[in-house]
Amino acid sequence: MAPGKGNLVVAQSGGPTVAINNSLVGVIDQALEQEAIGGIYGAQYGIRGVLEENLIDLRQVPAKDLAGLRRTPSAALGTVRHKLTDADYDRLLEVFRAYDVRYFLYIGGNDSMDTAHRVHQLALEANYELHAMGIPKTIDNDLVGTDHCPGYGSAARFVALAMRDTGFDTEAMALGSPVKIMEIMGRNAGWLTAASVLGRQGPDDAPHLVYVPERPVSVETLLGEVEDCHRRLGWVVIALSEGARDEEGESLGRSGLTQEVDVFGHRMKGGAGDEVAQLITAKLGLKARVDRPNYIQRSFMSCASSVDLAEAYSVGRIAVQNAVAGASDQMISLVRVSSAPYEWTTGMTALREVANLERPLPDQYLDRADGHVTEEFVAYAKPLLGDPFSLYTRLSPRYVNRT
Amino acid sequence: MAPGKGNLVVAQSGGPTVAINNSLVGVIDQALEQEAIGGIYGAQYGIRGVLEENLIDLRQVPAKDLAGLRRTPSAALGTVRHKLTDADYDRLLEVFRAYDVRYFLYIGGNDSMDTAHRVHQLALEANYELHAMGIPKTIDNDLVGTDHCPGYGSAARFVALAMRDTGFDTEAMALGSPVKIMEIMGRNAGWLTAASVLGRQGPDDAPHLVYVPERPVSVETLLGEVEDCHRRLGWVVIALSEGARDEEGESLGRSGLTQEVDVFGHRMKGGAGDEVAQLITAKLGLKARVDRPNYIQRSFMSCASSVDLAEAYSVGRIAVQNAVAGASDQMISLVRVSSAPYEWTTGMTALREVANLERPLPDQYLDRADGHVTEEFVAYAKPLLGDPFSLYTRLSPRYVNRT
C-alpha cells in the first residue's frame, strides 16, 4: 500500500567509496520525481545526523552539483560508524515524527542494514507509517542477498590496475628487490584481494600468490610458495589481504615473529604486509617491498568503474521508487542476468536476511592448490570493473649473438 | 665531429617509472632514422646487461610493440642498481670494442649519470671513440641541470589525485578517524610530497600539513600543528615524505618513540607514516590512518601525465640525435620556456655537473610558517602533471529548520 505524502531522510554510513555519492544522487533524483515525497533531507554523518537533527535540505542542491557529486568520491553527507542504543531508537522515532519522515533510506554495509531493519521494526511496533529501505554499499563485497555490492567494482578496478603496474615494476627490479607484497583491504573477506588477479595478461603475471582470510595458510606454506615462485620466475608478487591469517587464526606475519609492542604497550601496527615482508627477508634472504594503498583503494575516482557508478546510482533510484510503491524493510539488491555479455537488474532482499551477516568468498572462487583464485571468479568479477584494460607490452627478446 | 657508423647500446637504470619506456622508444625511433647507427642493442638490467653481454636486438621489435611500450610502465629492459668497480670498467670497454659500440645511452638518475660520465672518460683515456649520453629519469625530480625530470610529472599526478581522494575520504570520516597520513616517496628530497598539494581546490583541502626532508620539524611542532588543524577543521591530512625528519635528523616518528627492534634485531620497518600515526594517536588521542602507496606512485600508468610521457620520449630521441651529431658526456635536460602557457625545449648539461648530486626543494618553494609549499611551487609543478583535474563537488548545506 502506497503511503501518503511525507518527507524522506537519506544517510550514508560506514566506509566511503567512490560510488556512494551516486547512490545518494539516485535517491535525490528519484525523490524529486515522486509526488508522494515532500521534503528530501540528508542526515549528516549517518544516523547521527538524525539523532542530532542535522538535516540538509537536498531539494536546494543545484542540478550541476548533483551531476558533480556523481564524479566525486567519498560520502558527501559525511559518514559514521555508530551502534545504536535503545535510547537512540526512541530518539529516532521522535525525530521522524517531528519532521514527518515517512521514508528512510540508509546507504551502507551490513551494520547499516541492521540499523535500517531495526528502524523499520521500531516504526511498525509504534504503529508509525515508515518505509525503511537499505541501499547496499561496500568495497568489501561481503553483503549477502546481492550478486555484488556498489563500490566493489571500482575498488577492484583500482586494485587490479595497481597490482598490474607494481607487478611490472617488480619484474624490472627482479635482480635487486625480487619480492613485492601488496596489502589489500579486507579483514574477513578476500573479495578485493581476489580482484588483484583481474589485470593479469598471462599465467606468470602478478600476483603469483594470493592470501585471503578464507584460506588460512601456515607460515611454512607461505615461505615455501614464495621460494618456489622465486626459483621459477626470479620474482614474486603477493596479494595479501590485510586479514590474511594462519591456521591458528593469527595474522600471517605475526605468527612467525614475537609480538612486538611499542613504548605504550600497544602492538606495533605496521600491518600484515610489513610483517610478512620482514619474515620473507629474514627467512629467505629475499628483499621484499610493500605497497599499502589503504584508503586510496576505496576513494580513487580517476579509475572508477563505469559499471559500478551506474549501478550505485540505480540502486538509489530504485530504493525510492519501491518505497513509494509500498516496500519497506528491504535492501535493494543487484541481480546478475548474464555475465557475458554482462547484464543486470535489481531485486530486493529482506533486511533481516542481510543484517550483520558476511559473505566470504565461496569455495568455487578459491583454489589453494595453485595459490590462486579460479577462472570462475574471474568470470564473475571482471564485468564489474567496467571498461577492459588496455594491454601492456613486454619485449620478446631476440638476443644479439655473442662475440 | 660526427663518428662513423657504429652500434648503439641503451640501458635503463634505477627505479622504474611510468615514463622510462617512452625514453627507450624515443632512443629506438631516433636510432632507426640514423644512418650512422648500425645495431641498436638493449642491455638487460642496466649496465649489468653490458657486463654480461645480455644484449637484445631492438631493431627486431615490431612497430606495434614500440607503440605498446609507450603505454607500459616500468622498465622493459629491466633495471638495476649497480655500483661499478674498476674491473667492471675494463670489462665494459672490452664489450664495447667486441660489439663495435660507439653510442652508449644510459637512462637513469644521478648514479646513472655518474656511470655514463665514467664510461665516457674511460673511452677517452683508451682513445676509443664512444659517445656516452645520459637521459634523465627519476620520480624524485632531484637531478641538477634540468628544470625537471621525466617520470616526476606522472608520479606527481598520481600523488595529487590520490591525496585529493583520500582527503575527501578523511573528511567524510572526521567523526571517527579524523587524521590521515599519506607517506610519499622521497628519502632526501620532498618534490613528490610537495606535489600532493596540486589537487587542492580550496584552502582547507587536503593536505593540511606537509613534511619534507628539507624542513626538519620537532615532534612537538608536528603534534602542535596537528592539534591546531584538528581544532580548526575537525580533520587533518598530512603529506609525509618517507624521509621527513626532526631537527636531529631522526625520522619523525622514531624520535618520539623508543627504537623498536624485531626478533632478528632489525629495526621494525613500518615506515615513517605508521610511526607518526602511532605518535599522534598516543599523544593526541586522535585515530590516525596511513596510506602508503609506495611503488604504485611510480608505476601507475592509468593516470600518467601526457606532458611527462611526451617529454620522456623526446629526451630519448634528442639524446641519439645529439650523440650522432658528435655530443658526448652530456645529459639531455628539460628547459622551461614558459610556465603559462607551458612551453619547453631540451638542452644539455655536462654529466660531471649532474653525477651523484641531489637537488633539494629550493627555499622559495617551501614555507614552514603555514606548513605548506608555496604558490611559486604550484606554478612550477602544475604544468608537469598534464591535463587539468576535473573538479569535485561538496554539498553547500542548507539546513532544514529544527522543529
Image (cartoon, coloured by chain):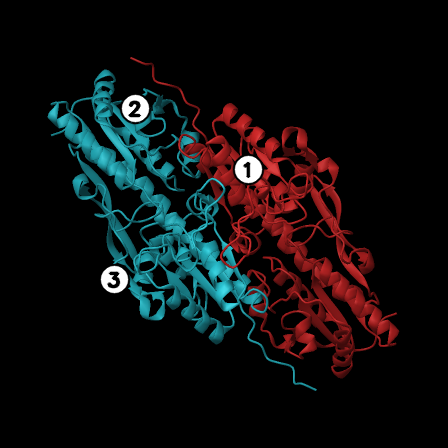
Chain colours: A cyan, B red
**Numbered marks: total:** 3
On the question of residue B133 being in view, the answer is no
Q: Is residue B305 left or right of residue B165?
A: right
Residue bearing mark 2: A50
Q: Within the image, what quadrant is residue B219 found in?
A: top right
Residue at 69 percent across and 36 percent down: it is B366
Q: Can you tell which mark lies on residue A363?
A: 3
Amino acid at circle 1: Ile
Q: Which secondary structure lies at badge 3?
A: helix
Q: Is residue B317 left or right of residue A211?
A: right
Amino acid at circle 2: Val
Q: Tell me where residue B328 appears, x and y as whole percent.
A: 82, 66
Q: Within the image, what quadrant is residue A229 found in?
A: bottom left
Amino acid at circle 3: Asp
What is the C-alpha distance between the residues marked 2 and 3?
41 Å
Residue bearing mark 1: B238
Q: Tell me where residue B83 appears, x and y as whole percent.
A: 71, 67
